[in-house]
Image (cartoon, helix red, strand yellow):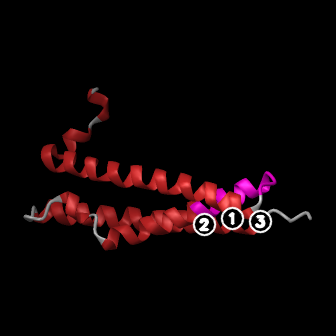
Amino acid sequence: MYYNPPYVLLVVGLLAAVASGVAFEAMLKQSVQDWSRHRSTRTLANLRGFALFLPFLGISLGVWVFLASGIQIFGFPSMIAYMLSFILTVFTAALVWYQLGVILNQLEAGGSKALDLDSF
């Protein structure tokens, strides 16, 4: 039995990830600017709360659907495509979330100069 590839889900997943990415960027910028202005006792690493995790989860879900749809275009069954893309998405999202914490800690310790990549 031949199934049509889910081109609509491919586009929906991409658009969901991009829309959530815009919200994530705005939330992260606002949180860092508020922290910078007030220099509260709250650390930057603690800014990774639910308000920042929700758009990050949206990005991850959008990427998951996008990857699964892309794999299905190559003829894989949907169950295998979604399982494979779930593993890839969870692994990548965990690494990105961890790296975000590392970068926020560097920013807190050394200011914006700590993130200057040209100095290397």
Residue position marked by numbered label 3 in the rendering: 6
The quarter in which the N terminus is drawn is bottom right
Magenta-tinted stretch: 64-76
In the picture, residue 47 is in which quadrant? bottom left
Three-letter amino acid code of the residue under disc 1: Val
Tell me which residue sits at (26%, 28%) in the image: 119
Three-letter amino acid code of the residue under disc 3: Pro
- What label does residue 15 carry, if any? 2
Three-letter amino acid code of the residue under disc 2: Leu
How much space separates mark 1 and mark 2, taking CA atoms? 6 Å
Residue 72 included in the magenta stretch of the image: yes
Relative to 40, 115 lies left or right? right
Q: In this view, does 65 lie above or below 111?
A: below
Front-most of 27 and 57?
57
Residue 1 included in the magenta stretch of the image: no
Residue position marked by numbered label 1 in the rendering: 11
